[in-house]
Amino acid sequence: MHPVEDKISAKIQIMSIIDAAIISFEEMTQEVGDTVLMIDSMGISLGIILVPPYTDEERIGAITKGTSLESFVTCESDPLKIFEILESLDPDRDTDGPVNVVIDHSFSVKGVGEVCGKDYISEQSEFIKEWIGAVREAIDGGLSKKEAADKISFLDRYPMDVGLKSFGKTLQKMNVNRLYDLLKENV
């Protein structure tokens, strides 16, 4: 298979299972254009466009006009702002059933952080179940959302990656708040 076809195939596989997209670019290139077209063709209408400071938002609007990216939020690369936007997104998804992760095969994604194998998925699944259990226990114990967010922490066992350590407590509170809301909706 031609190298370009490898990238397109991997992008299509990824885009077929996501609820929202984050696209980041410094300048308009062929690759950015291809990604915009692919996101649009997959019908992904929730997401964020990350732009450098002082970007002309009218130009971004011209690029996304008539595509599913018109509804994307445009912002600079600020982790807190990105997480706020992601938390506000409301994908149309069934959350009543158990979490299913379908893995039909593996493929390489270059330069996207630490790599883990399929064997790690069961450990990650157990960790997610622990989070859900801890938040469910807090709800059953009568804790408010704020009290649960202040109390629950797994940073001692699962510390943040290099460069993100200062964001750990904030991210954990965001996770607890989101789980709290989801679990309260399904009570």
Image (tube, rainbow, N blue to C red):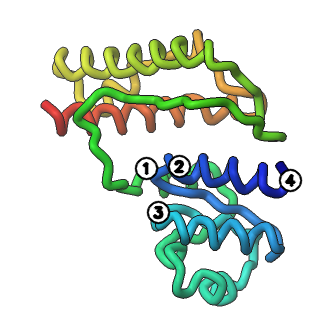
Per the model, the C-alpha gap separating discs 2 and 4 is 36 Å
Query: Could you tell me the amino acid type at mark 3?
Result: Leu
Quadrant in the rendering for residue 39: bottom right
In 3D space, how far apart are the residues under numbered discs 3 and 2 (Cα atoms)? 14 Å
- From the top left corner, tell me how far across and down residue 1 is, in percent: 83, 48
Q: Residues within 10 Å of mark 2 (few under 14, many from 20)?
A: few
Q: Nearer the viewer, mark 3 or mark 2?
A: 3
- Label 2, on which residue? 83
Three-letter code, disc 1: Glu
**Secondary structure state at the residue bearing disc 4:** loop
The tag earlier along the polypeptide, 1 or 4, is: 4
**Mark 1 surroundings: few (<14), some (14-19) or many (≥20) residues within 10 A:** few
Dot placed on the residue nearer the N-terminal end, 1 or 3: 3
| C-alpha gap between disc 2 and disc 1 | 6 Å
Q: Position of residue 50 (x, y in %)?
A: 67, 64
Q: Are marks 1 and 3 in contact (CB under 8 Å)?
A: no
Q: Say which amino acid is labelled 2.
A: Phe
Q: Residue 98 location in percent, x, y?
A: 30, 27
Residue 169 lies, with reference to residue 74, above or below; the image says: above
Count the marks.
4
Q: Which mark is residue 46?
A: 3
Q: Nearer the viewer, residue 77 or 63?
A: 63
The answer to which quarter of the image holds residue 108 is top right
Cα–Cα span, label 1 and label 4: 38 Å
Q: Secondary structure at mark 3?
A: loop
- Say which of marks 1 and 3 sits in front: 3
Which of the two labelled residues, at mark 3 and mark 2, occupies the earlier sequence position? 3
Label 4 crowding class (10 Å Cα cut-off): few <14, some 14-19, many 20+? few
Q: Residue at x 76, y 28 (%)?
A: 114
> Whole-Å distance between the Cαs marked 4 and 3?
31 Å
